Amino acid sequence: MKRALFGPVLCGVVAFFTLTGFVNVQTPEDKILSKGFQAFMDGDDRQALSYFEEVVRINPSNRAAQKGLEKVKIRLKRLVAGEKAKADDLAKQKYREGRSLESTGDLVGAIDSYHVAEDAIPGFKPAVKSLANIRKKMEKTSERKRLNLSTWSFARGVLAYLDRDWAKAWRIWTERLKLEPNNVSLANATALAENNFKRMMIKEQEEFFRRGARAFYAQGLYEQAQNTWDKVLLIRGDDQEALEGKARSEEASLRAAGKGRNNEIHDILEEGLDQYSQQNWRKALAAFTRLMEIDPSFSTAREYIAKINSKLKSPDYIPTSIAENGNWRGSRPSNQGGESVKVDGEGENFAESKKELQSQLNRDPANIRVQQELDKLAKAQEDESERVYKDGLIAYSQGNRSMAIQFWKQVLVINPEHKKAAAALRKARAEEERTAEQGAAQ
C-alpha cells in the first residue's frame, strides 16, 4: 500500500519543487518543462503549449507536462472564445456602420465596412446579404441601355470594388475623374480604391520579403537574411519578427565568419530580444549595451539601443517630431473661412526637402540611402495630404463647407500637386460664391 502511494506522491513533490524553483534543473527535459511553466505564468500560452508538447514528445509519461498541457489548453480555449466574441462585436459594429453609410449614399464606404464585418466572421450573413444587394443593384444599373456615362462608370467601378479588385476600380474611376474633376463623390471613391490597392501591394511585398528572409536564414545565408529583414523594416519599422530576425541573422553571420563569437553573446542577444518583446525597455537597454561593450561592431545592437532610447523618451509612442512640435492638427482653423491656413513646419517643407534630396540623388545616383529617404519623404507627403483631403470630404459631407475649404487649402500647402484637393476646393469656392450671391439677391 505504501509502495503504491509513493510513486504519485513523489511525482507531485518533484513537479511542485521544479515549478517553484527549489530543485536545480539538470536534464534537458526539466529545462524545457521549467520554461513551459515560466511561459504559462507569464501568460504566453502558445509558447507554453510548445514547451509542454516538446516535453511530452521526449517523455510521454511526464505527468507535470501533461498537467501543464491540460491547463494551457483550457486557457487557450477561453482565449479563443474571447477572440470570437470580439470578432462578433466587430462584425456587428461594422455592419451597422455599413448600413449607416449606405443610407447616406456612400456605397464605397459601406462596402469597406461590410468587407471588414465579413473578414471578422467569414460568411457573416447580414454583411453577405448587403453586399449581394449592392451587387445586384449595380449590375442592374450597368446593364441599362439609356444611362449617363458617369453613373455607368461608377457602377462598373463598384462591381470591381465588391470583388476587391482595387486596381480595376481605381482605373475605371480615374478615367472618369479626368472628365469630371469636380465630382467629389467620385474623387472620394477613387481615393479609397487607390489606398486599398496600395495597402494590398505593400502587404504582398512585405510578405514576399518576410518569406525570403526566413528561407535565407534556414539555408544559412545569413547576410542575405539580414538584408531582406531590412527591407521588411523599411515597410513596417517596428515589426517584432523582422527586428529579431535581423539581429539573429547578424549574430549568426558574424559567428559563421569566425569573428570571436561565443555563447555569451548569443545568450545576451536572446535576453535583450526577449526583454524588448515584453517592453521591458531598461532591461533590454542593459542587455544591448553589454553586447556593444563585448562587440562594438554589432550594428543591430546599436540600432536597438537607439530605438529603446527613443521609446524611453517617448513612453506613449509619440513620434519625436510630433512630440517636439505638437500635433499640427490641433492648430487647424475652425469654421472661419477667412483665417489663414496653418500647418506645421514639416508639412510646409515637404517640397523643399524633396528638392534637396533629389539634388543629392542627381549628384550621386547610386546612393541608395538618399533614394530611400526620398521615397520615405514622398510617402509621408502623400499620406499626410490624403489624410487631410479626406478630413475635408468628411466636413463637406456634413455640410460644413467652410471647414472643408480650410482642410483642402492645407492639402495644397502640404502637396501643391494634389489635383483632387484643388478640384474640390474650386467646386466648394464656386458653391460659396453662389450662396453669397443668392443671399445678396434676397
Image (cartoon, helix red, strand yellow):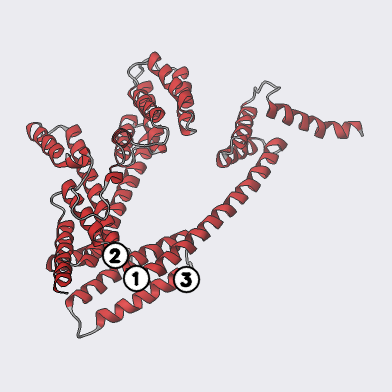
The structure residue drawn at horizontal position 35% and vertical position 78%, both measured from the top left corner, is 136
Q: Which mark is residue 397?
A: 2
At mark 1, the secondary structure is loop
> As shown in the figure, which amino acid type bears the numbered disc 1?
Thr
**Spatial distance from mark 3 to mark 1, Cα to Cα?**
19 Å
Residue 309 position in % (x across, y down): 38, 26
Residue 404 quadrant: bottom left
Residue 163 position in % (x across, y down): 33, 67
The structure residue drawn at horizontal position 17% and vertical position 37%, both measured from the top left corner, is 371
Residue that label 3 marks:
126
Q: Nearer the viewer, mark 1 or mark 2?
A: 2
Residue that label 1 marks:
104
**Spatial distance from mark 3 to mark 2, Cα to Cα?**
26 Å
The structure residue drawn at horizontal position 14% and vertical position 39%, both measured from the top left corner, is 354
Mark closer to the chain start, 1 or 2: 1
Tell me the quarter of the image containing the C terminus: bottom left
Crowding at label 2, few (<14), some or many (≥20) Cα neighbours within 10 Å? some
At mark 3, the secondary structure is helix
Foreground residue among 270 and 353: 353
